[in-house]
Amino acid sequence: MKIYKGFCASPGLVLGQVSRLEHHVETTTVGPFKPSRELQLLTDAIRTAQDELESMADRAAPSEQAIFQFQSMMLDDEGMMNEVRFCINAGVGAAAAMNQVGQRYADQLANMKDNPYMQLRSVDILDATRRVINIITNRPRMWLALDHPVILAAERLMPTDLFSVPSGMILGIITAEGSGQSHAAIIARAMNIPGVVQVGRDFLDDCDGRTVILDATGGQCTLDPDAAARQQAETRICELQRENEEMGQLHALPNRTKDGQPFELLANCFGPEDIDTAMQSGAQGVGLLRTGYMMLPGRILDEQEQYFFYCSCLAAAQGRRVTVRTFDFGSDRTISDAYQGLQSSKLGLRGIRNSLRQPRQFETQLCALMRAAARGPLQVMFPMVTTVEDWDAAMRVVERCREHLRERGVPFKEDTKFGVMLSVPAACLTAEEFVAHGVDFLVVGTNDLTQYTHAADRELASAEHYYRPASSAMKKLITMVMDAARERDVPVTICGLAVGNPANTVQYLQLGLRSFSVSPQNLLNVKKALREAET
């Protein structure tokens, strides 16, 4: 019996036999190559790969569909495919050319240390290019049918690996490398498949066919467990099944307080991947979608790329409302070299201040958002709004974007809802002015509002004592917002890390708030507290 330590990618506990998966990508064929023939091979392989990806997307949950759609889109990427064709015309075989260019693109994304969203996409590129290469070289892309469920082990898993095994045949996953935020891990969580990453190469060397206890929640796996360990694992598996049933009962209960008042539970999310997780955890929508995590170093995604991202998020939300926050550099901190210096500091040109100084970038984002709003219930909020002049200036840009979209004849939602994220005390003190100027909704952002109210950096441990999101001062500001909103029946949501603390959330409930946006992992704990509270 030997224990290997790793990191949890998807929680759970299972006992079973290991089946090792190895990725073979064969790109070496004998030349010389005729460019016209290789180009045709490439074209046919891409068409086949996209058909296979479409078939996987049809069988996937909405968030997983976004992953496969991205892979298919990359195979249509003009810049990437032009480089592959250039290599072929220079005498390189189609398979080798695809491997060379795909690896370079994947490496570029993997090196984006400040952009976790794009880092995730590096494996998607490798997955898509591997599929094309295997088609060109006539290698299989599907696993052989299994006669019993197994625990998959690999150096790392690709998103499509989990769809290349018959349904119900994967007990768990173990990888020598990888990340808990990888798309394979996200899919595993969505499919309730326990998984551990980064157990090391030693485990892979002699695991195939052997029995393993996979304690994914604890981030470890036990190879060749003895009788006592097996008995203990089987007992704990039964206990977990009972606990899951109890949690499932809470999930099914209505969102009502002890005295019968309804409340709304939304989720704070980064992209389509964690939106699906939030929906499965009981979220009624997305109260905060951060947009900075889809940025590329040195440039903002163009309108079509952003449109695709927002549509993917709507698909993952399964018809529920998605509230998108426009770019907030300095808060998201996705790129270390973007807008360096004081202008993007906490007291600088963050949020809407920066967007108004970058009109072309702002218009691109707004056009993409209003186009996506035609595909589902999407609304937009501006961060770091300080005065009503900020709001009016932003809405003038919105109107320009409406005119541009009409001229282009592009479908979009004319009456897309726009709101303000109240993260500055000055905005809370004058909330009635925003209501009078036609704001559609308000969102209280406790993270920034607390630090600005108490002059306490939320990331500074020595100032932690002063960072009090449920202080009397915070409650007065929130009450002023609620009073102003009530005049014209403007909905108010509160979001931020503080809302994930049930004790704080109950206090916000008693101030009159009925809409709360929290991290997906806090949804059920907050729901339990609110159901036991009285208004």
Image (cartoon, helix red, strand yellow):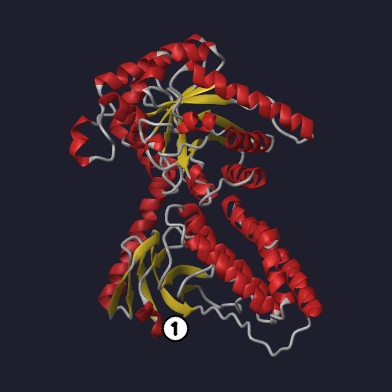
Residue that lies at the very extreme toward the bottom in this rendered image = 30
Badge 1 element: loop
- Nearer to the camera, 512 or 156: 156
Which percent across, then down, holds residue 526?
Answer: 36, 36
Residue 194 vertical placement versus 327 (above, below): below
**Which residue is painted at 31% across and 65% down in the image?**
235
Residue 221 vertical placement versus 298 (above, below): below
**Which residue is painted at 56% across and 78% down in the image?**
147
Image quadrant holding the N terminus, namely bottom left
**Which residue is painted at 57% across and 63% down in the image?**
124
Kindly identify which residue carries mark 1. Answer: 209
Q: Residues within 10 Å of mark 1 (few under 14, many from 20)?
A: few
State the image quarter where residue 378 is shown: top right
Residue 329 vertical placement versus 488 (above, below): below
Does residue 160 appear in this view?
no
Does residue 52 appear in this view?
yes
Which percent across, then down, holds residue 211?
Answer: 38, 79
Which percent across, then down, holds residue 398?
Answer: 63, 26
Q: Tag 1: residue type?
A: Gly
Q: Is residue 510 left or right of residue 47?
A: left
